[in-house]
Image (cartoon, rainbow, N blue to C red):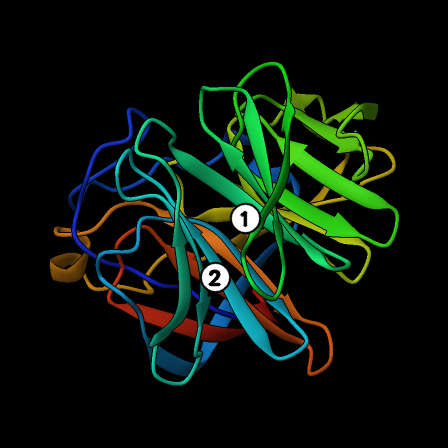
């Protein structure tokens, strides 16, 4: 299994951690398995991309970026980091998580309660949906969409209407896991970046139980961390079983392989 991570210069979204301060460690880590990683490959990444969502589908890397006036959806060439296709969104919207479902690409916004839906190939707008609360992470499987809102809950949504089918509270033992951010389905589990940490939670989507954590500390050097923002963005290439992660404004993308510790 592999995983990818990216970075670039700092900016504030009201929920950012900039600089080289050591991120917090989830207190329940001592009670659950923790995976480490090895770096398989390193790729260039756009230093101006405030990464909020990442997905790899059918050989294509999609990326959603944030910040008012800088939010976009993109098609990116993995090997070079070149932006092959891009659509900006109006500056009043702060882009958040993205996901591809069938022929469409969905994009959340941070505090405006609006999700945009685009044609996956052309990026032409198709429709939009309203939702309550904040928009953070978004992923999908064959059954529909899964959304995070910065709390300890995952919402399971109908992709045709964006109505909520159900929600689960994510728990690590007896501890609720808050600040669930960018999401990715990986072989039946939901991988969730925990905001302002270097950890990803592996979650059973049926029961909401955290089965393990992934510690991604050390992907960037302290010097690199001083000029970027937090870890964010997870993508999985199911065809080749490669896992990717990225960060806001990082200069690199890392493909990694998970290892037991």
- x and y percent of residue 171 in the render? 70, 28
Q: Find numbered disc 1 in the image and state the secondary structure of the residue it sits on.
A: strand
| 10 is higher (above) or lower (below) than 255 | above
In 3D space, how far apart are the residues under numbered discs 2 and 1 (Cα atoms)? 10 Å
| 89 is higher (above) or lower (below) than 75 | above
Residue at image coords 58%, 32%: 115
Residue 187, image quadrant: bottom right
How packed mark 1 is, by other alpha carbons closer than 10 Å (few <14, some 14-19, many 20 or more), is many
Residue at the far top in the pictured view:
132
* Mark linked to residue 13: none
Residue 220, image quadrant: bottom left
How packed mark 2 is, by other alpha carbons closer than 10 Å (few <14, some 14-19, many 20 or more), is many
Residue linked to disc 2: 245
Marked residue nearer the N-terminal end (2 or 1): 1
Residue at image coords 35%, 41%: 66
Residue linked to disc 1: 200
Residue at image coords 28%, 24%: 14
Q: Is residue 148 left or right of residue 18?
A: right
Q: Is residue 8 left or right of residue 217?
A: left
The reply to whether discs 2 and 1 touch (Cβ–Cβ < 8 Å) is yes
Q: Is residue 79 left or right of residue 7?
A: right
Q: Find numbered disc 2 in the image and state the secondary structure of the residue it sits on.
A: strand
Nearer-the-camera pick, 209 or 230: 230
- x and y percent of residue 144 in the render? 82, 44
Q: Decide if residue 184 is in sight here.
A: no
**Quadrant the C terminus occupies:** bottom right
Residue at image coords 47%, 19%: 112
């Amino acid at each position: 299994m592999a995983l990818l991570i990216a970075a670039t210069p700092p900016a504030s979204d009201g929920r950012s951690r900039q600089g080289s301060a050591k991120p917090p460690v989830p207190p329940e880590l001592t009670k659950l398995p923790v995976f480490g990683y090895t770096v398989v490959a390193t790729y260039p990444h756009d230093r101006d991309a405030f990464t909020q969502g990442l997905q790899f589908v059918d050989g294509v890397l999609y990326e959603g970026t944030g910040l008012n006036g800088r939010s976009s959806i993109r098609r990116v060439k993995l090997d070079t980091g070149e932006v092959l296709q891009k659509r900006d969104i109006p500056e009043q919207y702060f882009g958040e998580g993205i996901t591809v479902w069938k022929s469409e690409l969905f994009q959340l916004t941070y505090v405006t309660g609006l999700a945009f839906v685009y044609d996956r190939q052309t990026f032409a707008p198709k429709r939009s949906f309203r939702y309550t609360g904040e928009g953070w992470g978004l992923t999908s499987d064959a059954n529909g969409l899964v959304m995070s809102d910065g709390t300890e809950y995952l919402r399971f949504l109908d992709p045709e209407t964006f109505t909520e089918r159900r929600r689960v509270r994510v728990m690590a033992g007896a501890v609720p896991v808050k600040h669930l951010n960018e999401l990715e389905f990986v072989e039946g589990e939901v991988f969730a970046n925990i905001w302002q940490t270097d950890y990803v939670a592996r979650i059973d989507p049926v029961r909401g139980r955290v089965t393990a954590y992934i510690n991604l500390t050390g992907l960037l050097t302290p010097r690199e961390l001083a000029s970027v923002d937090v870890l964010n963005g997870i993508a999985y290439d199911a065809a080749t079983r490669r896992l990717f992660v990225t960060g806001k404004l990082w200069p690199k993308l890392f493909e990694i392989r998970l290892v037991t510790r």
